């Protein structure tokens, strides 16, 4: 069994946008719930050519996918135990897992539905805008949770506005959450955006069902997997569909040492 050489398990949270303004508040939220044995890094991308603060459109996702994978490869080379791609679309999840030999890659949608399925037989996802529903529904179905999904309901607030007026956001979540429970027979709710961090408790208290914050769900899953990697030697598989590109080919293409895509980085010990 591999013996972990670090004194702490290293977990990175990647905000896959090109602006750092979520790094500090999200990092503080995560630092308040992390284990003492976890070293947390919160990073964001560093491409000044596309200073995007949201990924609500596939076009925006396409522009940052390469940087997300490069950040994952950097994590793998820097002995990071687990990396969270901090967007509920779970964009580039499979791509990052393919390139990582050591870093376990986690994403919020998958982590949230796995948690919800342990708490209830049916759940609804409360999303920001109708635009998100089709893509997020595909994700949930691809993970095998089609029969668990009661509904997706939109609150008509964009991702970059969810924290502008938290009371209004909570009010809209409660409104649509109540409809999901009463009309769609949801037994639990998932907040379908990591920018909803810090809002779940009031919703859960008022509606009386489990309410899953994807920021917490993804981070705690990554933290647990990092600890299991340390104690049990569990690492990502690189066989068959998980096979990475051959090292010789990466070298021939000049991709064996890509430049880092990381911009801002904050560490919480």
Image: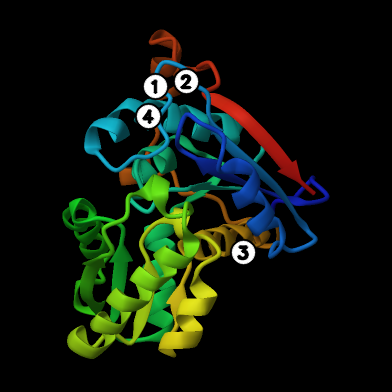
* Alpha carbon distance from label 1 to label 4: 9 Å
Q: Position of residue 89 (x, y in %)?
A: 33, 50
Q: Position of residue 200 (x, y in %)?
A: 49, 72
**Is 98 in front, or is 216?**
216
Task: Tell me the colour scheme of the image.
Answer: rainbow
* Residues at circles 1 and 3 in contact by the CB criterion of under 8 Å: no
- Which residue is labeled 4 in the image? 64
**Is 251 in front, or is 114?**
114
Q: Is residue 27 left or right of residue 37?
A: left
Q: Position of residue 142 (x, y in %)?
A: 23, 59
Q: Which mark is residue 200?
A: none
Mark whose residue sits in front, 3 or 4: 4
Disc 1 element: loop
Mark whose residue sits in front, 1 or 3: 1
Is residue 209 shown to the viewer in this render? no
Q: Quadrant of residue 17?
A: top left
Neighbour class for label 1 at 10 Å: few (<14), some, many (≥20)? Answer: few
* Alpha carbon distance from label 3 to label 4: 27 Å
* Alpha carbon distance from label 3 to label 2: 31 Å
* Alpha carbon distance from label 2 to label 4: 9 Å
Q: Quadrant of residue 176?
A: bottom left
Neighbour class for label 2 at 10 Å: few (<14), some, many (≥20)? Answer: some
- Which residue is labeled 1 in the image? 50
Q: Position of residue 181 (x, y in %)?
A: 28, 86
Tell me what residue is drawn at x 44 percent, y 10 percent.
254
Is residue 75 shown to the viewer in this render? yes
* Alpha carbon distance from label 1 to label 3: 34 Å
Neighbour class for label 3 at 10 Å: few (<14), some, many (≥20)? Answer: some
Q: Which mark is residue 224?
A: 3
Q: Earlier in the sequence, mark 2 or mark 4?
A: 2
């Amino acid at each position: 069994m591999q013996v972990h050489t670090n004194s702490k398990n290293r977990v990175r949270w990647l905000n896959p946008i090109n602006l750092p303004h979520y790094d500090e508040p999200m990092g503080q939220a995560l630092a308040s719930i992390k284990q003492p044995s976890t070293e947390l890094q919160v990073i964001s991308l560093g491409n000044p050519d596309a200073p995007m603060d949201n990924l609500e459109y596939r076009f925006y996702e396409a522009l940052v996918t390469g940087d997300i994978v490069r950040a994952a490869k950097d994590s793998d080379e820097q002995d990071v135990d687990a990396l969270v791609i901090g967007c509920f679309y779970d964009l580039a999840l499979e791509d990052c897992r393919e390139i990582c030999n050591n870093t376990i890659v986690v994403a919020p949608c998958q982590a949230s539905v796995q948690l919800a399925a342990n708490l209830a037989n049916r759940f609804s996802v409360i999303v920001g805008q109708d635009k998100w529903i089709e893509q997020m529904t595909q994700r949930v179905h691809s993970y095998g949770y089609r029969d668990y999904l009661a509904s997706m309901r939109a609150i008509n607030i964009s991702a970059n506005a969810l924290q502008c007026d938290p009371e209004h956001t909570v009010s809209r979540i409660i409104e649509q959450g109540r409809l999901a429970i009463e009309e769609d027979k949801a037994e639990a709710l998932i907040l379908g955006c990591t920018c909803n961090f810090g809002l779940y408790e009031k919703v859960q208290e008022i509606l009386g069902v489990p309410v899953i914050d994807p920021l917490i769900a993804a981070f705690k899953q990554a933290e647990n997997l990092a600890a299991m990697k340390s104690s049990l030697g569990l690492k990502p598989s690189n066989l068959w569909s998980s096979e990475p590109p051959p090292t010789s080919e990466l070298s021939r293409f000049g991709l064996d040492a890509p430049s880092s895509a990381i911009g801002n980085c904050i560490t919480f010990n």
